[in-house]
Amino acid sequence: QVHLVESGGGLVQAGDSLRLSCAVSGRTVSSTALGWFRQASGKEREFVAAISRAGNTYYLDSVKGRCTVSRDNAKNTVYLQMNSLKPEDTAIYYCAASFRMSPLFASSYGQRAAYGDWGQGTQVTVSS
């Protein structure tokens, strides 16, 4: 079983940046596809970004150009760098692990069902 622990959330102002971290144990990040999702109050959990085993990255259209997903194999950690934050980015951000191999992951990275293990989430609040 993969264990994921997110950190790095907080209260920031619009236009600020945050880097979320997801420490992974039980499996190496280099052998695991990992995704970031978010859930705003009263809304469904939605896909934000993902990185495949091969290092291919995928993004929600509304965060393209503002967010970057990356991983550090030595630290077994995946990151979500978020710049130019907007109030609509306010949500709990979750890290999730998928064991799907490409190309199946490439066709399903945005689906919650593609991920089998989830972290507890970290709150991001962006004030206007």
Image (cartoon, rainbow, N blue to C red):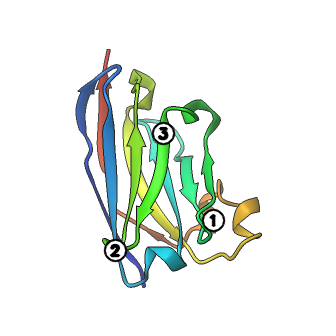
* Screen quadrant of the N terminus: bottom left
Q: Residues within 10 Å of mark 3 (few under 14, many from 20)?
A: many
Q: Relative to 74, is 45 above or below?
A: above
CA distance for labels 1 and 2: 28 Å
Look at the numbered discs 1 and 2 and tell me whether their residues touch, using CB distance below 8 Å: no
- Would you say residue 38 is visible in this rendering? yes
Closer to the camera: disc 1 or disc 2? 2
Residue identifier under label 1: 113
Q: Position of residue 76 (x, y in %)?
A: 36, 73
Q: Which residue shows up at 54% across the image and 43% down it? A: 44
Looking at the image, residue 87 sits to the left or right of residue 64; the answer is: left
Q: Position of residue 39 (x, y in %)?
A: 45, 43
Look at the numbered discs 2 and 3 and tell me whether their residues touch, using CB distance below 8 Å: no
Q: Is mark 3 on a helix, strand or loop?
A: strand
- Would you say residue 121 is visible in this rendering? no
Out of 70 and 113, give the one closest to the viewer. 70
Q: Which residue shows up at 41% across the image and 25% down it? A: 84
Q: In which quarter of the image is residue 24?
A: bottom left
Q: Which residue shows up at 60% across the image and 65% down it? A: 52
Q: Relative to 7, is 68 above or below?
A: above
Extreme residue in the top direction: 128
Say which amino acid is labelled 3. Answer: Cys
Q: Relative to 117, is 48 above or below?
A: above
Disc number at residue 74? 2
Q: What element carries label 1?
A: helix
Q: What element carries label 2?
A: loop
Residue identifier under label 3: 67
Say which amino acid is labelled 1. Answer: Ala
Point out the tag, 2 or 3, that comes first from the N-terminus.
3
